[in-house]
Image (cartoon, rainbow, N blue to C red):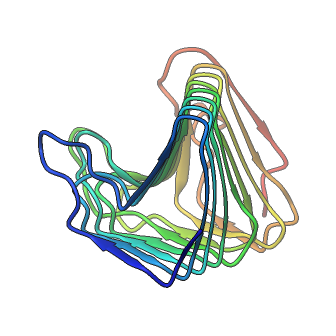
Amino acid sequence: GVDNSTFTNNGTASNYGAGIEVANRSAARIDNSTMNNNFNDGVGVFWDSFARVAGSTLSNNGSFDPFDAGFQIAHHSSVRSNDNTVSGNGYAAVEVGQQSLFRSNGGDTFTTVNTCNGFCAPVFEAYRNGYVEIRGGTATADATNGLLANVIHQSLLEMRNGATATGDVDFSNLAFVRMRNSMTAFNGSLLGCDGSNTGPGFSICLDQAP
């Protein structure tokens, strides 16, 4: 367990540096801590590992390229999150892929950076069988033409249970997006459901919130 701790300025261009890294069939509980200004991710969870993070701040970690994030989850791993603030990180607030799961159980605040480099940073990115489930909390795309989410490669985004979200969702390659009517508000569009998505493959939209 990690309680009431601060992790800052870890990592270099030649050495991966997260605030906290959980890897290789490991588990961690992180409470009331700060991951700020680390060279790569705020919290990285990889290779069959698990983390529960609550009441913490993940801010200003990493850079747009190579797609650093507040939470980075990959390789059959998972994170449970509640009451965290995730903002200003290099690319996404949450990036999850390679058969991994991120679940927000409520009370979280997610925002992305106002950064575009050919395409704009999303709040959430799910790729290669990644699953993002947001139950409550607030997610906001800051950039004028930024994205709430980018969902690709047979991945899934689901938002429900009082969640409030602002920004468009883009998806392709057999993606599934569900904005359930138990959301408080969804201020955006599901690109592709209206024919505007130019990505390959097809996507499924269900229960778009009013």
From this viewpoint, which residue is outermost toward the top? Answer: 201
Q: Which image quadrant is residue 204 in?
A: top right
From this viewpoint, which residue is outermost toward the left? Answer: 13
- Residue 148, percent from left and from top: 52, 55
Q: In screen coordinates, is 43 left or right of 64?
A: right
- Residue 113, percent from left and from top: 32, 64
Q: Which image quadrant is residue 60 in?
A: bottom left
Q: In screen coordinates, is 41 left or right of 17?
A: right
Q: Is residue 166 above or below residue 200?
A: below
Q: Nearer the viewer, residue 189 or 117?
A: 117
Quarter of the image where the N terminus is located: bottom right
Q: In screen coordinates, is 71 left or right of 37?
A: right
Q: Residue at x 64, y 27 (%)?
A: 129
Q: Residue at x 29, y 62 (%)?
A: 61
- Residue 33, percent from left and from top: 48, 79
Q: Is residue 154 above or below residue 148?
A: above
Q: Residue at x 68, y 74 (%)?
A: 137
Residue 151 in view in this figure: no
Total marks in image: 0
Quarter of the image where the C terminus is located: bottom right
Q: Nearer the viewer, residue 69 or 196?
A: 69
Q: Nearer the viewer, residue 59 or 45?
A: 45
Q: Residue at x 62, y 33 (%)?
A: 48
Q: Is residue 36 above or below residue 11?
A: below
Residue 170 in view in this figure: yes
- Residue 174, percent from left and from top: 66, 20
